[in-house]
Image: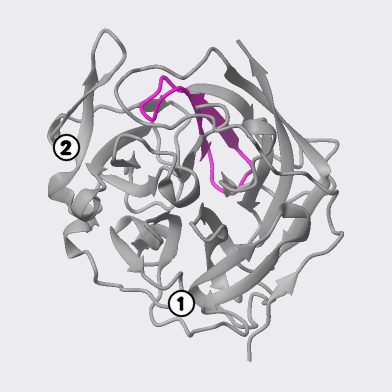
Amino acid sequence: MRRSIRLLGSAAPLAFACACSGGGGGGDSGSNGGDTTIQGITFDWSTYQELAPGSDNWPLTWCEDDRQYTSWGDGGGFGGTNSDGRVSLGFGRVTGPYDSFEMLNLWGGVDSVAEATFGGKVISLWCLDGDLYAWLSPGSDDSNFEWSQLIRSQDKGESWQEDAFPESRVDGCDGCPGLPYTLQYGRNYSANTDGYVYTYWIEIQDEDEWDVQTPGLIFLTRAPVAGLAFADAASWQWVTGFEASGNPRWGAPGQRVPVIEDDDGVMRGSALFVPGLARYLMVTNHSARNQGNLRIWEAPQPWGPWSVVFDVSGWPADDPAAPVEPRFSFGSFSPKWFRSCGHSGVFVWFGPDQWNSVAFELDLGP
């Protein structure tokens, strides 16, 4: 037996419909489709929700069936606890609008559709042509640096092919790229227009220390969607420099250059395209892990130029309007729950080990 959990009336009602198309993303034009930039963010704490105590990570992606899919680690998932239904790795489904969404454990966790068949951790997954892809690492703490490899689900998360793409494996080492996170491109990747999958990589500075990697260097790869070329490391092109126009040059990994350099360091990240604004948002944590050191970036293209629009330590405990004290550890923007043509949406994070979510408004300007 399995159960689907539904929240009703637990957050302020929000109208998430958006009638504008917002344009597609990707390409080498360097244009952002307009002069609007994201300059800040304001959180609406009347919409705060917390779920799934004991389970961490919670990246989100959006599929063609209009549902979102997510992953967690070291807990029982939706309706579970740190011990009830606990698995090393689980996947779940989120259906509906933010003020009344339903949750279901698909693979692992309490009352799940299917049992988990292997362990590890996932902080990035995305939907493409109706299939789910995720970056798997071997486990908790510094073992996450040992390797990363793509896994695949062709039945919306009810089963996973652990060894589907051995050519995607990247072994970790000091000075090597690791902790990959793939750019979210709207529903079923449909906002992308140039036919590439974009993935960010954080350089491992100390493979023996599960903490912020300082200095923080973030690299970018692209690979064609066609033929699943993105699942073969031999097809990845790395940003190796920039033209005078701001467009990137692409080449071999040995010539890679960072698209973001952060002296405060970086650890885990997420990124997505906001179709209504034709802008990109990225989330990183810096300085020290699990201390609420949240940094949000925006850019007109996947490669930048990236600008910081929100930078705080001790978040959200430092916000006097926040009803909670959990420290931010890792988070992402919901790709589905944007409204008002990208002007507002929902942010999801863990810290401590649970699902936390809150609606927000973006501060826009020229």
Asked if the stretch drawn in magenta spans residue 286, the answer is yes
Picture coordinates of residue 269, whole percent (x, y): 47, 43
Do the CB atoms of the residues marked 2 and 1 lie less than 8 Å apart? no
Looking at this view, is 327 or 94 the one in front?
94
Where 84 falls versus 296 (above or below)? Answer: below
- Magenta highlight range: 279-306
> Are there few (<14), some (14-19), or many (20+) residues within 10 Å of tag 2?
some
The residue pinned by badge 1 equals: 158
Q: CA distance from mark 2 to mark 1?
A: 35 Å
Q: Which residue occupies 28% across, 18% down?
A: 247
State how the image is colored: one colour
Any part of residue 223 in sight: yes
Find residue 143 and report its image quarter.
bottom left
- 280 left or right of 30? right
- 204 left or right of 267? left
Picture coordinates of residue 82, whole percent (x, y): 64, 75
Q: Which residue occupies 85% across, 59% down?
A: 10
Q: Amino acid at mark 1?
A: Glu
* Numbered tag placed on residue 253 in the rendering: 2
Any part of residue 175 in sight: no
Asked if the stretch drawn in magenta spans residue 297, the answer is yes
- 58 left or right of 247? right
Where 18 falls versus 147 (above or below)? Answer: above
Picture coordinates of residue 104, whole percent (x, y): 62, 73
- Point out the image quarter for the N terminus: bottom right
- Point out the image quarter for the C terminus: top right
Looking at this view, is 151 or 137 the one in front?
151
Where 293 falls versus 53 (above or below)? Answer: above
Residue extending farthest to the bottom is 1
Q: Which residue occupies 32% across, 65% down?
A: 151
Which element is circle 2 on? helix
> Are there few (<14), some (14-19), or many (20+) residues within 10 Å of tag 1?
some
